Amino acid sequence: MKIIYLWIKTYEHIKNRGYLFHAGYTADYDEGTNSLTIQKTDNIESLLYGDRISVTAIVGDNGAGKSTLLDAVRTILFDSRSWDKSIEGFLVWEDKGQLNLFPFMKKTPDAPNNISVHKTLPDNFNLIYYSDFLDIKYYLNEFDDEEDVYTYIDEYHDSFRNRYSIQINISTAYLLRKNSSNMLDFFHSDTRRQIDFYGSPQGKSLPFPAPANLSVKIEFLGIDIFDNVLDAPLQAYEYMGMGHHGEINTEAYIIGLLKEMEKCYHDKTNPNSEPLDVLQILQWDIFVVYLYNLLSMRRQKHNETNDYSQVDAIIKRTLPSSIEIFDFWGKLEKIFSQTWTDDENFEIYLSFYLGTLDALESPKEGNLNIAFSIPDHMMQILSAYIHSRKTPGRRANSRTALQALLRFPDEYMARCGWNGNWSVDTFMNFYNNYLKIACHIDFLKCSWGLSSGENNMFNLFARLHEALQVEEKENIILIFDELDSSFHPQWQQKIIRSLTEFLRKGYPNKEFQLILTTHSPVLLSDIPERNVLFLRKDSVETNHEQTFAANIASLYYDSFFMDKGSIGETARGSINHFMDAVLELEKEGNEIESNQGRAQRLLNRFLDKQYPNMGNHDKKSEDECRTLLQLFVDSIGEDIWRYKANERYHQFLDIGKDKKAKLRDDLTEFAREQGMDSVIALLKEWLEKENQ
């Protein structure tokens, strides 16, 4: 399915407009006669993008309805509740060379015989929607199609025929809403997509080399976990009392366990003790968070009463013996060495830990370099341990070796089995296990080391890759709202080619229709004029200049309706104010007897226009004013404008000198004709008038 022509009688602020979405046709609808004409025509899409890809761009004024038009397409294809309420019109699409018309208004248009009229839409396509900008309109649930799942649609006109299609929303606003219960899930889900895309054959279709290194920062819970995380919630509980010497005086087993765990941790981090390794800290963190979540569940069920019996019973199944009898660290190690547990709450934590062990023991022979960084507080523990060891011999050698590792933390993590060349599958298994507990204990922060533009580009392709795995549909409609958003002009130059190559090479059995809005003339120069919809606030314009391989300045003027030029308002207004100031002072030239003070007057007049009603300006000397105004003129980038401003500026400065020279020439000519005595008499006459 390819959308060819859409006519909208009414939808939000769109009234009685037709939109041609395919350069392979011309189309016209006469509402007065209710007649539709469509003809096939030649186009160059196959030369630019390939036989299976079409591209349509939508550009125009701000507020002309570009995003609204995209919403209309999504509404027509998926939001069946709106057809008979808020939107009227008809849609023409092509399927295997056959033109079809779907009316969603009272009167079906009169169409040529080669167009089949249907009461339903086909079910051989999926739609993928992408946008990276945030807008509350798109954060809210705008459509009733339950994005990302099979969509049951009751067709228009109460037809009994149903279809199943999928709209896959990979916009940032939607994914944020989807993960609104835990914002970190949004970032983790993007990382998971990127890793999966990296390991796929399609992952090579990027406009820059695919990153080969993934940095993972470990941010385990610190030593002060009880003070910062647990103590505050626990203080809300009703303790049965504390003894004078600090001993725990409560019947709640979990509170005694937490206090003992805190003491054990501090004892273990004493410089005289063997330091904790990464796996011990991992066990500690997991178990602390497990206990904390048990307390949270108890608080929700018991309204913060002092009844801990249910939590105590769960813990005793996991840790059946008294903590005072057994060594805590040994007990903790034993808990995490089991392959099963009686407590289903602890099962996901145990599963993650055992999965981590399997991943660390796997051969590091993959092509994805993973570099874990050591937590700061762990480095402090290890450093304290090293400095406490001062005896010679073997212990000194051990200290030296550990010091060497601490100078190169990556070597230390490699020795522990973390750093190395993981296979994508191994790391994905590890990461997927981690995501199951990330809502409870979020300690991994992943980074590819890319620039913001590269990361956005990588993320776009990763989201597309995941969306295209959902269903083996033959036809895919891809809608991009403001595709150029956040991309550097270099990426804007590459995005169309990168997208079409990615789709053409990675998915050779699918046909794609790309519909995008853009504000970028760089991006638009990759799309022929016949593939572009030019929207004004009151119309859809035709007969524009060519856009493909066009001059960027021309695209600004013609395609983006830059009536006031292509430079910014500050630059344009400043140049106009400068030239107007010069013109006004030239007209007032008789009031300026010489070239002294001209730059001062020009600067003040210029500033009055720049900042009206601002009062007096800082006083500057004539030389300072000349220097500042010349610097302004020299800052103008356009050669013609700079030359004209410079010419008018210097002509104005020298106007007094020119008048004096002209007056001297006139007096010389007068003396030659009338004699010097006549000149002297004239000057005396002027002087007498001035003295009167």
Image (cartoon, grey):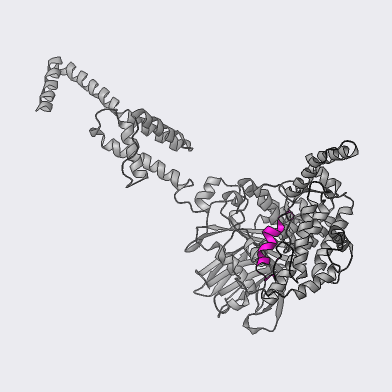
Q: Position of residue 679 (x, y in %)?
A: 15, 19
User: Residue 404, relative to residue 537: is it above or below?
Assistant: above
Residue sitting at x 40%, y 35%: 645
Q: How many numbered dots are placed on residues in this image?
A: 0
Quadrant position of the N terminus in the picture? bottom right
Which of 531 and 313 lies nearest the eye of the viewer? 313
User: Residue 294, relative to residue 204: is it above or below?
Assistant: below
Q: Position of residue 351 (x, y in %)?
A: 84, 64
Which of 273 and 673 lies nearest the eye of the viewer? 273
> For residue 654, what is the image quadrant?
top left
Q: Position of residue 398 (x, y in %)?
A: 87, 40
Quadrant position of the C terminus in the picture? top left
User: Is 577 situated left or right of 315 in this image?
Assistant: left
In the image, farthest residue toward the left = 692
> For residue 190, what is the image quadrant?
bottom right
User: Can residue 509 be spotted in the picture?
Assistant: no
User: Is 233 situated left or right of 602 in this image?
Assistant: right
As for residue 236 lying within the magenta part, the answer is: yes
Residues in magenta? 217-242
Which of 541 and 431 lies nearest the eye of the viewer? 431
User: Can residue 643 be spotted in the picture?
Assistant: yes
User: Is 236 situated left or right of 194 in this image?
Assistant: left
Q: Position of residue 27 (x, y in %)?
A: 58, 66
As for residue 588 lying within the magenta part, the answer is: no
> For residue 310, what is the image quadrant?
bottom right
